[in-house]
Amino acid sequence: MREVAELARVSLKTVSRVFNDDPHVLPETRARVEAALRELNYTPNTLATTFRAGRVPIIGLVVPDLVDPYFAAIAKAVGAVAEAHGMAVSVTSTGDDADREPQIVTATLGRSLSGLILAPVTTEQSYLRPWSDRTPIVFVDRAPAKITADSFTQDDHGGALVATEHLLGHGHRRIAFVGDALTKPTVHRLEGYHAALERHGIGRDDDLVVLDVWDRPSAAEAVAALRALDEPPTAVFSSNDRASMALVPAVRETGLALLSFGDFPMADLLEPAVTVIDQDPGTLGTLAAERLFDRLANPGKRFRRRTVVPVSLVERESCRRTSTVV
């Protein structure tokens, strides 16, 4: 900066103002400084900036699974917003391990990041209280518990109710619910599923609720167990896209209808194409990142803490009673 100031015949403060796009710099002065910046190929010293601001120009993003298309879409959206604000993103995953989450997240925050976006797998996040007063933290996909923070989630209960109503509208009365862990999103979706059945006078049947479906082997076991019931289901409501991808080969040739909470790659190209509840993870990621930068720019401003983004049914062909996914 000193070299730039000497070449442009201005003060260090003027160089800083030009570099930070301060509008109160005379045009001729700005042109002289910009010419010097180009001639000297000036780049800012990130370490020095960190010492002055007390944080690095990086935000953190922690999600359960980066391979999951849903969380990958969130990460892509967060990255786009961060890039627009001149920041980088440090991304890591917890691997659905609630015991490791506090360690991973606090280690991430220990790098003096400018802020954090978190999709938690723990049931409560009180471990973040020591950090919340000095670092903006925004929750995405899952709302926080035992800590006050901004959150952006989708309408899990309403989406599950719509999905189950759709299957009921196709004449299904024995509808299975398949998911992975009984975390917040799954709990709310299970409640929506039960609410739709109750609305139609159909009693709960715990045999039709199968959890711990994470991959193809567990999906195959789940489908086999469901088909072995005295009154097997005619349809499966999958509570997330990962379970849905595992279920596709398991329901092949079974005649089971399939509806997924969450779209997934090639769902629209299968025969029949799979009906889904579209969550729009890109919007969730964008909103969460924009809120984080709003918090950084306006630390004293009041914002609505909780935002629930609506979901929508994308109707395809997989819910007919005679459908077979191939």
Image (cartoon, grey):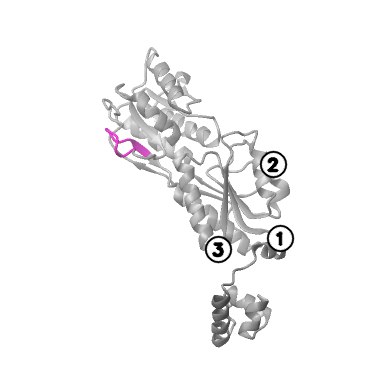
Q: Residue furthest front?
A: 40
- Magenta range: 267-276
Taking the image as shown, residue 137 lies to the left or right of residue 193, namely: right
Q: CA distance from mark 1 to mark 3?
A: 17 Å
- Image quarter (top left, top right, bottom left or bottom right) of the C terminus: top left
Q: Nearer the viewer, mark 2 or mark 1?
A: 1
Q: Is residue 25 visible?
A: yes
Q: Quadrant of the N terminus?
A: bottom right
Q: Which mark is residue 86?
A: 3
Counting from the top left corner in percent of width and height, residue 175 is at: 38, 25
Residue that badge 1 annotates? 54
Taking the view exactly as shown, the residue that stands out farthest to the right is 130
How crowded pointer 2 is (Cα within 10 Å; few <14, some 14-19, many 20+) is rated as: some
Separation (CA) of disc 2 from disc 3: 31 Å
Within 10 angstroms of label 3, few (less than 14), some, or many (20 or more) residues? few
Determine contact: label 1, label 3, CB under 8 Å.
no
Q: Earlier in the sequence, mark 1 or mark 3?
A: 1
Helix, strand or loop status at disc 3: loop
Which secondary structure, mark 1?
A: loop
Residue under the image location 49 percent in, 32 percent down: 191
Residue 291 is one of the magenta-drawn residues: no
Indicate left or right for 45 with 306 as reference: right
Main SS, magenta residues:
loop
Dot 2 and dot 1 residues touching (CB under 8 Å)? no
Residue 313 coordinates in the image, percent (x, y) = 36, 41
Residue at the (35%, 30%) spot, across then down: 258
Amino acid tagged 1: Gly
Which residue is identified by label 2? Answer: 126
Query: Which amino acid, by three-letter code, is at mark 3?
Result: Gly
Nearer-N-terminus badge (2/3): 3
Q: Position of residue 248 (x, y in %)?
A: 36, 29
